Image: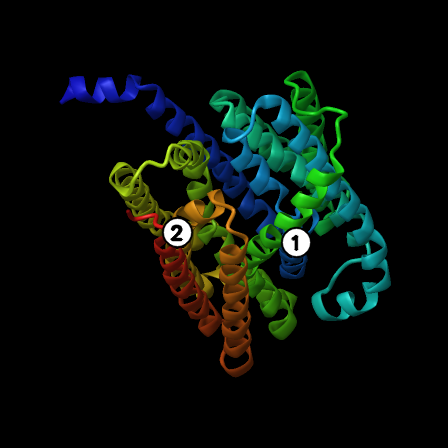
Amino acid sequence: MLQKLQSLVQKNSFKQVGLYTAAGTLAKVISFAALPFFVNVLSEGDIGILNIFNSSIVFLTPIISMGVLYTISVDFFKLPKEDYARVFSTGFLIPIVFSILLVPVFYIFREPLLRTFNFQYQFIWLIPLCLLLNFCYEAYIILLRMNNKARQFAFMSLLKITVEISLSILLVVYVYQNWYSRALSYMISAALIGVLFFIFAKRNGFLVRKFDKKLLKEELSFGLSGLLLQTAVFFIGTSDKFFVMAFFGKEQAGFYSIAAVFASVLFIISASLMQYLQPILYKKFAEKQGWQNLKGLYKKYILAMFGTAVLLVIFTWFAYHFLLKPSYRDYINYFYILCGSGFIWSVSNLFLQYIIFHKQKKVIAWFSVMSIAVALLVNYSMVHYFDMRALCFGQVITNVLVLAASLYYSKRLKCFE
């Protein structure tokens, strides 16, 4: 048994999984270690505003990227490096243009946004800039992942969160004791990674001066379906926080967002495992390997996520009772429900990879529209007729339906043959 364990640990695949998972987990641990500080120093209203700030970035990322992140993931295994560099460089124009266009849009609608979502005036320039920097970070980790640079991936992930949290604490203590310090630290840490991204992309030949208008049109065409899919992901996992803010106010949004932050550990672990699995799955999909060669990976992933959910419940109970303000303790039941919802989503995310790889525009569009409609209907019904606890259960209902849809479309695309 010891020999088998030693052999497993020495395998390169095990080391890569360990690095990806450890980096994602440690980054979340660093964030959680600082959470009691921010919760106890900042007001519930500031926590609610930060929730809207973070949710806005999640919501608007698909709009400014238009599916480019999907393309640079999928085409890595389909195109020669020279063609891929042209695709990468051409696609990068899209988030730059859309981020710039968001500034006047925010300025025009600043008053309605302020009344409805407590949308702060600083968001007018802060969110577009953070969106572009966040795109650079996402593109950077995709390149690192596809090139099997697990160590560099882990370093960049930890560097970003370490700089962000350290700077946040310093700014909160010595400059602004409100949400603004936290938001500024996010921007500065993302800017640091953005500089490193450009250096890496240029040195490795991914950024070139060859732009293709025809390719840009194709990217925009596929980007519409990619936009719908990423927007659907937002509505599935993040739109509930906007409904809380709009119907219950920023203080209640603060209570809800803390429960959602703890539940989001499942998303972090899922994303970490997917950093390793996605290149393997895409390569197997490109080689047209059947379900018999894939189901083992699927089973191991689902078991890993279930084990993570169990450990997360234990940790969160401890945190709510011993680390956070007593006022948050009455809302721990929100976490339990959202944790179950997050586990169901993590399974859906796995089956979505087959759909994304084949870039079936109509399938992606139908799946996305259905998911958006379900999320909106469920969220509105729960907050309008019931309460925040019902909204938590609504996330479970939404994700069960999304999982059923992802299985249905995967079967239609012959994933299980």
Question: For the view shown, which residue lies furthest in the left direction?
Answer: 1
Which residue is identified by label 2?
413
Residue placed farthest to the bottom in the image?
385
Classify mark 2: helix, strand or loop.
Answer: loop
Give coordinates of residue 399: x percent, y percent.
Answer: 42, 62
Q: Residue 238 falls in which quadrant of the image?
A: bottom right
Cα distance in 3D space between marks 1 and 2: 40 Å
Identity, as a three-letter code, of the amino acid under mark 2: Leu
The location of residue 325, given as percent across then percent down, is 52, 56
Could you say where residue 15 lies in the image, as x and y percent from the top left?
Answer: 37, 22
State the residue in front, 213 or 160.
213
Element type at mark 1: helix
Dot in front, 1 or 2: 2
Q: Nearer the viewer, residue 295 or 56?
A: 295
The amino acid pointed to by label 1 is Leu
Q: How crowded is mark 1: few (under 14 residues within 10 Å), some or many (20 or more)?
A: many
In depth, the one of 158 and 127 nearer the eye is: 127
Task: Check the image and report above or below for 35 versus 238.
Answer: above
- Asked whether the viewer can see residue 206, the reply is yes
Name the residue carrying label 1.
50
Residue 333 in the image: above or below residue 83: below
Total tally of numbered discs in the picture? 2
- In the displayed structure, 287 sits above or below 362; it is above
